[in-house]
Amino acid sequence: MKSTRILATFLVGAALVVGACSSAASPSPGASEAPATEAPATEAPATEAPVGTPPTDPLGVVTVAPGEPVHIGQWGVFTGANASLGQDSNEGIQIAIEDHGGKILGHDVRLTTEDALCSPEGGATAGAKLAADSTLVGLIGSTCSDETVGGIKAITDAGLTTISPSNTRPALTDAARGPEYAGFMRTAHNDLVQGKAAAEFVYNELGLRKAATIHDGSSYAQALQQVFADEFTKLGGTITKQEAVSTGQTDMKPVLTAIAATSPEFIYYPYFVAEGGYTTAQIKEVPGLENVKTMGADGQFTADFVKAAGAAAAGHYLSSPDFTAFGAKYQDLVAKIQSKFGHAPLSIYHAHAYDGASMLMAAIEKVAVQGADGTLYIPKGALRDALFATKDFQGLTGTLTCTPTGDCGAPVMAVYQITDRETGGQWPPEAPIWRQGQ
């Protein structure tokens, strides 16, 4: 669902900024800032409008005075067991801003972050705070689907549009979604794709026929395990039991014991770092599950999960986007993250965040109107329309085209397996062991 476009006279084409990169301070969690670089850039200026006659827009217009920055934000998880997921995306965003020359139409880019805690309540708090900031132009986020469930209404009602690099819950872009999701879109895959890929891997590649699932009550894990169960059943498999744990739960043996009574060959538990770690560490200790195979998903694709699970993580499977299918420039991003932050990518959505930030900056340049005195007027409804109209955008993760409900990703799914290499401290896994469609 998109807002009404502003008059065409205010819509202008603009090329992406190309400039030298320089370092920017890394934002710390909770509304901190990363100063934009001062590197010069070659720009295509926005259309000039007479001073005092800014454009009108049904969702409002952000005014950026001469010398003031264009303000974009990121919301997601930055503290707790899942912090690496949000930080991974943040690092991709920072590199995207630097690659863009650190400026939009002559104005520095200001990036702030808001911790949404990977929960509906945290998302609601973060969403309300972001919605109240009249200087914000657009957002990247959230990290966890639950955050979006809690915060999207406030963000949409404020006229803001957010691009998630990692929300995968199918309902977020379903045609039946409510009007509160008009400001939501994503560069991440849809779990209708990921759940199907996981089922195909287990049934066709591993040759297993009996599986159980566990979720943690989150909208993400509940939906993903159900897609897996439905697809596995369609293929001819049997789901022996579907169980649930609670966020914060540490003793998984009662649930695992109930599952063991149904004699599964495989257990799928696509939830997050802490609970995933406890489950993996305890699963082989339960009689009847000594030889069961296990699998998680993108929420566990981080070295923090391996630390949480310990040596028991060896052999565990993880579904993920296929990094080997990304564009040739993806390795440049990996090298820049290593150089700037001193480590390999923390999780899997740094490139999706890079693409989201690049899409947002390109769209801002497309719709911005510049006054004769250098004031920049950014109409929020026109910006939303330009983002949803994205077509054939050449991103690091593939060629991105957005659907009317905001699915913009170009997903190619794969399965990785954790080995002694990863439990020994090396991350990430070197290559997928299976690719969907191959």
Image (cartoon, helix red, strand yellow):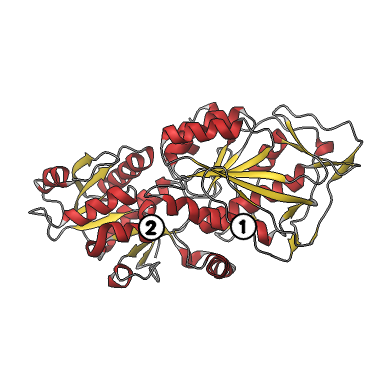
Residue at 84% across, 51% down: 45
In this view, the mark in front (2 or 1): 1
In the shown orientation, is residue 319 left or right of residue 275?
Answer: right
Q: Which of marks 1 and 2 precedes in the sequence?
A: 1
Count of numbered marks: 2
**Residue type marked 1:** Ala
Mark 1 is surrounded, within 10 Å at the Cα level, by few (under 14), some (14 to 19) or many (20 or more) other residues, namely few
Q: Is residue 338 left or right of residue 380?
A: left
Determine which residue is flagged by label 1.
Answer: 25
Q: Residue at x 65, y 50 (%)?
A: 359
Q: Quadrant of residue 205?
A: bottom left
Please rate how many residues cluster around mark 2, counting C-alpha atoms within 10 Å: few if below 14, some from 14 to 19, many from 20.
many
Q: Residue 20: horizontal and vertical position, in percent?
A: 73, 66
Q: Nearer the viewer, residue 281 or 55?
A: 281
The residue indicated by pointer 2 is 301
Residue 136 lies, with reference to residue 278, above or below; the image says above
Q: In the rendered image of this protein, does residue 252 appear above or below residue 24?
A: above
Compared across the picture, whether 210 is left or right of 26 comes to: left
Label number found at residue 63: none
